[in-house]
Structure formats: C-alpha cells, structure tokens
C-alpha cells in the first residue's frame, strides 16, 4: 500500500474510532485515583482475547475477569503506557493490526479511540508521540515504514519509509528489535535477516541505528563484535539508568541455516550472552565495559528485562544446554549492571509448577529494587509476585482469577 493511501486510511479509522459509541469500562473498584492494569488471557484452548482489569494493589487481594474487565478485540495484544494513557496494540500476524487507547475516568478504564493500522513489530513512546514501525522480511521489498501517533490529539502526525538493506549494508535486512528514545534521538537496535525465517550469516555482531526525531533520518549505525545482536524479536534490549548511561543485552541466540539441511536452522552465535554499555551522550559502544553474563551466571543468557532503578534489572533468562540450545524453562534473576552481578531470585515457584512468566510488560516504580511480574501456574492459578532485586527475593501478591497474566501496567 502506498504511504499516502495508508495515511488516509489510518486517519479516517482514527476519526471513526473516536466517534464510536461508548464502551464498557473495566475494573474491580469504583473509587478514583491511580490504578494498576492487569491484562489477562482467559483459560481456553485457542483464539481468545485478553481482558483488562484494574486494581488498587499488586501486593495483596484478588482480581477477576469473571463478569468483569474490558475484552480486547483480537488475540496477540501488546501494551504501552505513556502521557497518562494506556495503549493496546493488536499484532495482526500478517493481517491489519489495531491500536486502542484508554485513560482513567472515575477509577475505571475509558476507551478514547480504536483504529485499524498496519501490523507493527516495534513501538515506543517518544516525546508526546507513539512511534511505530512496520518491517519487511522480504529481500525483494526491503522497505520499513514508520509512523507517529500523537498522544494528545490521537491522530497520525507523520510517517515515512526507509530502505532496510541500507542499515547494515551486508546484503541482509536490518530488522529492528525495538525502538527507544535517547535524548532528542531514537536508538533502534536491529538484527540481520536473510529471509522470513530470521536466519543470518552474521550471528556474532551487534548493531544500533541512530535516527533524528521527528523526521527519522538515519544519522549513524554503530556496532560491536563482542556479543550478538541486541534484544530479541519484539523485545527491548536497551535500558537507560539514572546517570544517562544506556545498557544493552544480547541473548546470544542468533540462528543460521544448517549446512547439511538449509531448510532447518540452528543457533550459531559463538559469542556469549553479554551486556554492553553506551555512555551517556555518545553514539558508540563503550569498549572499556563488557559484562559477560554467560560466564558470571554459569551458562545463562538474558532474554528480557525490566529496569527497577539503581542500576538493577529483573531479567528473564534461560540455561544453555550441552547441544548449544537453551532450556525451555525460564529463570528469573536480578542483575546489577555496574557491579556486574547475576543473582537468581528466591521465593518464586519453580518448574514444572510454572507454566509461564510475563515477559514484555512487567511493572516497576523504579525505586531501585521493586518490580512486579506475573506468574502463571500449571494448576491454572495466576499470581503477581513482588520482586526485591536488591535482595534477590520474591513475595506472592495479587491473585488473578479466570486466566493467565500477560501484562502489568500502571495508570494515574
């Protein structure tokens, strides 16, 4: 679809969504003030959509989707809170996506707009916008498209495109793992792919593209060869700490086509899972800093993280196996990027009791130690656990009834 026609379609869709009839509001309480938002997928076999419920506390009590909450349109929803609004993104799996926005009114979620969009695989809050990127996986049509939605007007205020082959200049598509605002610029870590199978001939390199904002002009690409690519698919690998330094993790799990059978792939990264640093105000990796996570942890990698302040991150990790693959089970740990420590969290349920942990949307008030993650058990019960990253301990909190926790956010 041409950019101009896409703009027109989305703008019309926003207008339609903004003028549609009012929707039910969701929540377990009716009093005003700030709320925690918990996204919950009902217990069912396939094809079910998340429900959004609100609660006053994550430390105790119960929240239920039974006869409660706001049902989302479509499965595979992802979330972002910015400018005192809660955004719900539908990943369309090749079909059109959607964006729904809410705020709080009298302590309950109120829908502000709902519009159809292209399916995006990376998005971020930048100034008072939500920046989104739709990306190509096809070498024959290597065009990435970006567009900006203003969070005040809830309208598209800019868009454009770029040639994805020009990012790495190695014959492969540079595919953004995520987007992050850094000062008045956007940093976009990416990995290289040679096809929709996400394999690469370059498994031992990290890249970050730097764009001006709001015009999204490519200013620079900087690299490092001490680890593999930063972040993962649909996963933010960058975290900014209080002094402005940026830390970047690599899961070290890039794959290439097998030589004996090109229809299959295998992990070919030989560099370790590690954390790199981008010093405040620079557009280079700091060559004096290298945190070899695999070595310090005894064989774990990092697959996701949540910053809690004080240089501490709560991380999801997996253990490397003798065949070069990683374990299916996830281990939750605390990482301090300045002290270069990796501590497994005690007090959490363990496999095979655990069905899943929330990954992309965990919550922290950034007090230097506290974070909240969802823990879904094979018994069918789900709980929010409070993590103390400084002490590397966990305490069971809110019980969620009716489904599995997929995200935890906060809205004033």
Image (cartoon, rainbow, N blue to C red):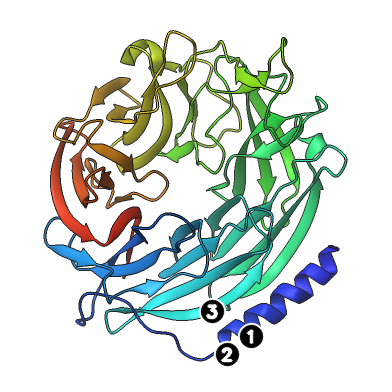
* Left or right, 344 with reference to 50: left
Count of picture labels:
3
Q: Is residue 32 above or below residue 174?
A: below
Within 10 angstroms of label 3, few (less than 14), some, or many (20 or more) residues?
A: many
Residue identifier under label 2: 19
Choose top left, top right, bottom left or bottom right for residue 119: bottom right
* Left or right, 412 with reference to 179: left
Q: Dot 3 lies on which element?
A: strand
Residue identifier under label 1: 16
* Left or right, 139 with reference to 246: right
Quarter that holds the C terminus: bottom left
Name the residue: 51% across, 56% down: 76
Q: Is residue 320 above or below residue 188?
A: above
Name the residue: 23% across, 47% down: 367
As measured in the structure, the alpha-carbon distance from the residue carrying label 1 to the one carrying label 2 is: 5 Å
Name the residue: 54% across, 17% down: 227
> Disc 1, disc 2: CB below 8 Å?
yes
Viewer-proximal residue among 228 and 137: 137
Mark sitting earlier along the chain (3/1)? 1
Q: Dot 2 lies on which element?
A: loop
Numbered circle sitting on residue 113:
3
As measured in the structure, the alpha-carbon distance from the residue carrying label 3 to the one carrying label 1 is: 8 Å
Image location of residue 305, percent across then percent down: 39, 37
Q: Dot 1 lies on which element?
A: helix
Name the residue: 46% across, 89% down: 22
């Amino acid at each position: 679809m041409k950019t101009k026609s896409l703009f027109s379609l989305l703008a019309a869709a926003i207008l339609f969504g903004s003028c549609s009839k009012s929707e039910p509001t969701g929540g377990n309480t009716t009093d005003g003030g700030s709320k925690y938002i918990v996204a919950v997928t009902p217990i069912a076999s396939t094809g079910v959509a998340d429900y959004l419920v609100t609660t006053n506390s994550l430390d105790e009590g119960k929240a239920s989707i039974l006869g409660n909450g706001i049902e989302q349109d479509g499965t595979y929803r992802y979330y972002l809170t910015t400018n005192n609004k809660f955004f719900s993104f539908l990943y369309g799996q090749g079909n059109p996506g959607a964006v729904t926005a809410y705020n709080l009114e009298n302590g309950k979620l109120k829908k502000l707009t709902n519009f159809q969009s292209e399916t995006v695989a990376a998005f971020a809050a930048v100034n008072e916008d939500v920046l989104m990127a739709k990306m190509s996986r096809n070498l024959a049509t290597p065009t990435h498209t970006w567009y900006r939605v203003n969070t005040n007007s809830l309208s598209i205020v800019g868009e454009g495109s770029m040639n994805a082959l020009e990012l790495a200049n190695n014959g492969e598509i540079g595919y953004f793992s995520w987007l992050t605002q850094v000062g008045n610029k956007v940093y976009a870590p990416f990995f290289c792919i040679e096809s929709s199978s996400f394999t690469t001939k370059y498994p031992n390199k990290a890249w970050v593209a730097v764009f001006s904002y709001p015009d999204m002009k490519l200013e620079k690409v900087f690299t490092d060869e001490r680890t593999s690519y930063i972040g993962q698919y649909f996963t933010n690998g960058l975290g900014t700490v209080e002094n402005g330094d940026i830390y970047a993790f690599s899961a070290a799990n890039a794959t290439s086509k097998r030589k004996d059978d090109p229809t299959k792939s295998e992990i070919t990264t030989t560099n370790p899972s590690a954390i790199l640093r981008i010093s405040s105000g620079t557009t280079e990796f700091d060559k004096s800093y290298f945190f070899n996570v695999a070595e310090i942890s005894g064989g774990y990698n990092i697959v996701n993280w949540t910053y809690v302040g004080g240089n501490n991150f709560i991380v999801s990790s997996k253990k490397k196996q003798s065949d070069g693959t990683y374990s299916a089970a996830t281990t939750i740990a605390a990482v301090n990027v300045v002290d270069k420590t990796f501590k497994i969290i005690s007090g959490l349920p363990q496999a095979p009791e655990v069905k899943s942990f929330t990954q992309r949307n965990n919550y922290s008030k950034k007090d230097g130690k506290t974070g909240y993650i969802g823990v879904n058990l094979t018994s069918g019960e789900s709980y929010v656990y409070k993590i103390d990253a400084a002490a590397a301990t966990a305490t069971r909190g809110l019980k969620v009834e009716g489904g599995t926790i997929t995200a935890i956010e906060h809205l004033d």
